[in-house]
Amino acid sequence: MSNSTRTDTATADATAPIRNFIDGEWTPATSADALDIMDPGTGAVLGQVPLSSASDVGDAVAAAKAAFPGWRSTPPVERARVLFRLQGLLKEHQDELARTLSREHGKNFAECYGEVQRGIENVEHACGIPTLMMGDTLEDVARGIDCETIRQPIGVFAGITPYNFPVMIPLWFWPYAVATGNTFVLKPSEQDPLTHQRVVELAREAGLPDGVLNVVHGDKAVSQALMEHPDVVGVSFVGSSEIARIIYQTASAQGKRVQALGGAKNHMIVLPDADMDLTTDAIVSSVYGSAGQRCLAGSQIVGVGGAYELIRDRIVEGAGSVKVGYGLDPDTFMGPVISGAHRARVEGFIETGEREGASVLLDGRGYTVDGYPDGHWVGPTVLEGVDPAQTVGREEIFGPVAGLTRVDSVEDAVELMHRVEYGNATSIFTTSGRAAREFRYHAGISMIGINIGVAAPMAFFPFGGSRASFYGDLRAQGKDAIAFYTDQRVVMSRW
Ligand code: NAD
């Protein structure tokens, strides 16, 4: 890999926009419009992202369409070998990737390293494609007649991904899409697209043929062009529920397959018999890790009966001791939020909460960090007396804010959760197996933690919510990913 290529992409200077990746080449966007990519901890400009046009999308889809016949007829075991090589390169560069990621996203190094690890695990899982993609057969479905199913790739898929996991979430999608023999066009988040550029460089180094994976940078205009393109057969999306709904409606109206993962409002239910130290650690790290910018972040802490006062005081103490700072400083637990606009949004939620009757037990508004006057800081915040009748009790805040509520029973906790439209994740903290089992049975939420604050399914299990947190049928990762990116043909034969 030449140094000049790297300068054009992952280590872009602030003067030239990063490039799209089309048909194996780093290609400048045709439009001159671009946005700054910021370091949210310092406010420094790290580079620029182009706002590509529909014609750039057309070029990328054409390259992906042209690459499809050759790639689909490449034996799965050979496709898997490219991913094996990519897995090795990602491991080799994990430190470097985590550092770039921390700079453009703001979260601490350990969180970034963990995110890259979760991405690598998806590449590892996709390496099993020769087995994962197998169909079924049954002899003699009628006398002398056999029946088999074959899973076949479909064509060009598109991915549209959010800012909060800019390495891992694209890797929920394109490794499975290409392992199954499809080709892919990715539109990463325009807020932090740099680290994934490096991932693409590594994919090329691993031997991914030209046109199999393409990247077009930009904003909603690029998403729109992808959704409307007649040669795109399906769309994988992750982002806020408002946009997930638009993507699902628009792309499915065009006859495409869609999986659209949306936002979240996750409840953490604490029973009086819980191990309060373990519970506090799990909740504090769930709420404040990544400055609350995770779809699995705890948002509403629900104390059942006598658990309420116990957990409230511990959460306030734990939140107050969270070390806020620059992501690459070694003792930082919580970094900044992604942008000044997002900081204003989170602070606006805290204000609304106060106005609607919540008590502010810990206030993160106007937070500063020594040495970083231009960072987008919001301090850990705790609001008491929050329920779904209030904006902060029902809407996704996506910042370091815990809402506290007291209920009398687990049934009341479930009823409270169901008054919120989201259905992404929830956790229960208890030492009672029976209570946990009852909760799991009735929760009606897709990802459930039992004494776990961030119930993140590993690569071989499906990832995705329900209700307003998910639009579609097949989720990300696991067997769902294989089903989403393939069509089953059923063959009946008599000889
Ligand atoms: P976002 O919805 O603002 O943007 C997501 C992507 O959609 C970006 O690539 C963006 O450019 C594009 N986009 C924005 N507006 C669009 C429009 N009108 N039409 C088409 N495309 C558009 O989300 P974000 O702020 O980048 O990410 C945070 C959100 O993602 C949160 O709501 C979070 O809960 C959610 N999220 C969900 C999961 C999950 O597994 N369910 C995982 C991670 C993040």
Image (cartoon, grey):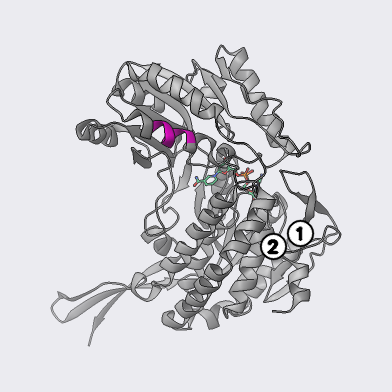
Determine whether 245 is above or below 55 in the image. above
Distance from Cα at disc 1 to Cα at disc 2: 7 Å
Horizontal and vertical percent position of residue 473: 41, 51
Q: Which mark is residue 221?
A: none
Q: Residue at horizontal 33%, vertical 32%?
A: 429
Is residue 394 left or right of 466 when viewed as pictured? right
| Secondary structure found at label 2 | loop
Most prominent secondary structure in the magenta stretch? helix
Q: Is residue 406 magenta?
A: no
Nearest the viewer among 428 and 72 is 428
Quadrant housing residue 266: top left
Q: For the residue marked with disc 2, what is the amino acid?
A: Val
Q: For the residue marked with disc 1, what is the amino acid?
A: Ser
Is residue 15 left or right of 83 when viewed as pictured? right
Q: Quadrant of ligand 1?
A: top right
Residue behind label 2 places its C-beta within 8 angstroms of ligand 1: no
Nearest the viewer among 310 and 299 is 310
Segment colored magenta: 279-284
Is residue 435 left or right of 37 when viewed as pictured? left
Asked whether the residues under the numbered discs 1 and 2 touch, taking CB atoms below 8 Å apart as contact, a structural biologist would say: yes
Q: Which mark is residue 52?
A: 1
What is the crowding at mark 1: few (fewer than 14 residues within 10 Å), some, or many (at least 20)? many
The residue under label 2 is 216
Inspect this view and state whether residue 115 appears.
yes
Horizontal and vertical percent position of residue 281: 43, 35
- Please identify the quadrant where the C terminus is shown: bottom left
| Secondary structure found at label 1 | loop
If you read the primary sequence from the N terminus, does the residue marked by circle 1 or circle 2 appear first? 1
